[in-house]
Structure formats: C-alpha cells, structure tokens
Image (spheres, grey):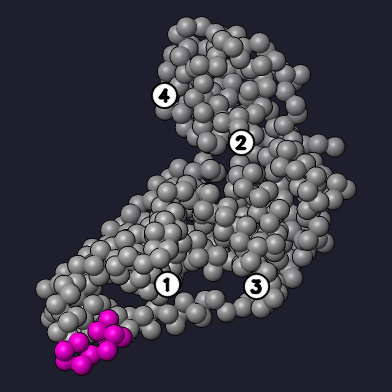
Amino acid sequence: MNSLLWTLWISLRISLLATALVMVVGLPLAWMLSRPRWKAKGLLDVAVNLPLVLPPTVVGYYLLLLMSRGGPVGALTQRLWGASLIFTPTAAVLASAVLGLPLFVQAARNALEGVPPEAYEAAQIDGADRWSAIRRIYIPLAWPGIWTGLLLAYARSLGEFGATIMVAGNIPGKTQTMSLAIYSAVQAGHDSAANLLSLILTAVASFSMWVGLRWRNPARARRGGGSP
Amino acid sequence: MKPIAPFVLVVLLVPALAACKARPAIPPTEVLVSAAASLTDVLREAQRQFEAENKPVKIRFNFGSSGALQQQIEKGAPVDLFIAASTAPVDALVRKGSVSATAVRVIASNEVVLIQSASTPALVRSWDDLRQSQVTKIAIGNPEHVPAGMYGREVLERLGLWPAVERKLVFGEDVRQVLHFVESGEVQAGIVYGTDAASSKKVTVVAPAPAASHAPVVYPAAIPIDARNAAGAKAFTDFLISPKGKAILGKFGFGTVD
C-alpha cells in the first residue's frame, strides 16, 4: 500500500512539474504563434506539433539520443553535474512536457487569437505598454483557453507511457509512474494488481479533471476563484 | 479579474527548478538491474534472498522489453547489470562496444510451448494440427521485436508449418499479450514460453517445441563496461547461478545452465 501511494505521488509530481514546464515554455510560443504572419512561423508551428504526430516511443527515442553522452543535452548535463538525465525523474518530466506542449500551445494560441484587437487598442490609449497589455488584457481574457491547455497537458502527462519508459526507465520507487506500474503488473501477470492500479489512476484522473474543469469556468474566475 | 498568470507561474516554477538540480544518481551500495519484464517475479524473489545475505547492498530493477533496455544501455544509461530474454540484444551491445564479451554469463533457460485455452474444447492436439482449417487464429509475439515471437517463427519454419499458418497469425506486442489472447479464447492456439504457460490456469500446454526446432532460449546476464557497481552486479549474477539461485529459478519454471 505504501509503495502504491509513493507511485501515485511520483506520477502526480511528474505530471504537475511537466505542466508547469509546459506553461513556462508554451505561453511565449503560443503568443508568437498567435501573432500575424512572420518569417519562420510555419516552421515553428510544425516543430511544436510534431510530438502529436510521432508515436510516443519515437519521441522517447529522440529524447534518449538528445540526453545520451553524445547528444547536446547529455553533453551539457555531463559538464554541469557529471551525470546524464537518463533514468531520472527529470527525464520523465521532460518527456511528458514535450508530449503535452502541442496540446497546450494549440489551446492557448486559439484563445489569444480570440482576444479582440479593440481591447488592446483601448489599453494603448490608456497608456499601457506592450508587456502590461499582455499581462492585463491578453492573458486574463484568454485565461479559459490557457487553463484548458494546461489541463490537456496535465492529462496527457498522467497517462504518458511510451516516451517516459524510454528515457526515465521503469524503476519502482524512483521513476515508475502509475502508467508504468500498470504495464509492469500486466507483464508480470499480476492481473488483479493491474486492475487495482488502473482503478486508482482512473479515479485520480477523473477527480483532478473535475476540479480543473470547475476552475476553467469563467463565471467562477470572475468571482476570484480562478487562482489555485 | 486579477492577472493571476504570473502568480501561477511562480508557484509552479519553483518546484520545477528545484527538481532539476543536480543529484548523484545512484549510491554505491545500489545495483541497478535492467531486466526483461518476463523475469519480474523470479528476480524479485531472488532479490529478497540476496539482499538479506548481502547487507547493505540493494538491488533496484528497471523492467522493460529487452530491445528498449538495450537502447538505453547503448545511449549510456547508468545500468550495472542487464538480464535479457534472448541473446540478440546482448550480442548487439557486445558488437557496439557497450559490453565486453567476457562479461556475459547465461543464467537461465526456458522452453517454447504451444498452448490453447483451457476453457474451450480442445481443437489442437499437436503442432501439425495448426494446419487444420478450423484453426483460424494463432497468436505469437511479433517476430520483428518480441523474442518469444522470433523463436515461434523459427519453430514454425523448421516444422515446415510457416506457409500454412502465416495468414492465421495474430501478433502480440509482448508475450503476455499472446497469453491474454489465448486465455480469452480469441485465438485457438498460441506460442509462449513454458514459464508463461505455467503461470496461467486458463491455458493448457499442447506440446513443447522439439528441442532442435529453435535456438536454445537462454537469458544472458551482462555487465556493461560503464557499470558503476560492477562488483555488486557480479555478486548478484553469482547468486543467480549458485544452488540457491537455481532453486528459485526452478521454482518459477526456468531451466538452469551449468
């Protein structure tokens, strides 16, 4: 039971950190993609969406190459702290973030594109500079879409399997998430354990999506219930 | 509405950065063993006895498919011992220089068997019966990457059955999936390892594959050149091929090698 709770904690921690990373990296990307045509926009668009098209194990293999000693990320971490990220929870966070990024960027970008130009013009007349317009006009008005994107990235991360097992391994107590534990239980022929794990993952996923969707509701957000 | 995005960002970013800070990957008393998923139960049992006798050494497992585990070691994953379900992935690592040929020892063997569901009327009584027209679906592991499927194809080819059964084959992505297909009665027969057949009450063994019909099914244990705890890995391998280790392997239906 204890190890089950620990596995659940690993899963939730990786998913939440991956979601945070997606937000930090994805919001500027969504902003850039929501602006009118500029050079190389199409290229960025394709690059961001690529993980959606490729099978997760292929994404995992690419990430493994990047993180290996010969790869750019591996060389960097080797120089910084003399170890590779392979088989660490950080690798799982990165894998989940890469796969969740396109889902977030699509939702956030659509929402940012939907902000009426008049709102921005009005803010400019009031003397707002570009940054405070983003902060005070665009992000609040696009918030339901941004929040939906975060939920999608979180959901994707909680169910992530193929890329995670490639780069983070399947090490119980360290990098084994609920999804990986279910795989292991099935492989070992422990069907009742697999059923129990699946049931718990379903319950946790349903609960967190229910909470998340309530927060998305703009009516609640206006009353000040929008911040977690 | 207040601009809450920066607030959310900071709250979520702090732990994210904290998680990225450096930490030594593995303490020196730990042995990280990448092992084929089909060995889960037998290795856990071996781990219990080994750790009790070798304090403070701790075994940590990374279970997966032999092919994926091979890729990880090739790319420098910090693995101390690799136990594969066939010789191919270990041979590949030896060729690529990640494992020295002298650091490979076979720890166990297995049988290839033909099974059918225990609950449906027996349709198949021998390998030759797979030719019959009533047998429409036969499950084997995908011979492209599932070791049990590679052996399965070899057996079918040597017995001259391949042309007759090729169109009836349903590929499982691992040997457990093959077992599930047979258990559920979705297919009339399947090819798995003896240990898999023994682990399920819902299937019966029709016949083992003739010994000469396939390469021996062996489980090699290899210590990568970059292992951080080669001594610990060697101690665990020694334990597996000791009389105590052999008793555990035998209990789970594995053959042992001298």
Dot 1 corresponds to which residue? A25
User: What whole-number distance in Å separates the C-alpha atoms at marks 1 and 4?
Assistant: 46 Å
Magenta stretch: includes residue B203: no
**Does B232 appear above or below B84?**
below
Give me the chain letter of mark 4: B
Q: Residue at x 57, y 79 (%)?
A: B21
Describe residue A23's horizontal placement relative to residue B99 as left or right: left
Q: Nearer the viewer, mark 1 or mark 2?
A: 1
As shown in the figure, which amino acid type bears the numbered disc 2?
Answer: His
- Would you say the residues marked 4 and 3 are in contact, meaning their CB atoms lie under 8 Å apart? no
**Magenta residues, start to end:** A124-134
Helix, strand or loop for disc 1: helix
Q: Main secondary structure of the magenta part?
A: helix
Position of B96 compared to B203: left or right? right
Q: Are marks 3 and 1 on the same chain?
A: yes
What is the number of the mark on residue B145?
A: 2
Please give the residue where the numbered disc 3 appears in the rendered image: A76
Tag 3: residue type? Leu
Q: CA distance from mark 3 to mark 2?
A: 33 Å
Asked if labels 2 and 4 touch by Cβ distance under 8 angstroms, the answer is no
- Decide whether residue A128 is among the magenta residues: yes
- On the picture, is A209 further left or further right than B103? left
Q: Position of residue B73 (x, y in %)?
A: 70, 54
Between the residue at mark 3 and the residue at mark 1, the CA separation in whole angstroms equals 19 Å
Q: Secondary structure at mark 2?
A: loop
Q: CA distance from mark 1 to mark 2?
A: 36 Å
In the visual, does B63 lie left or right of A121?
A: right
For discs 3 and 2, the disc positioned in front in the rendered view? 3
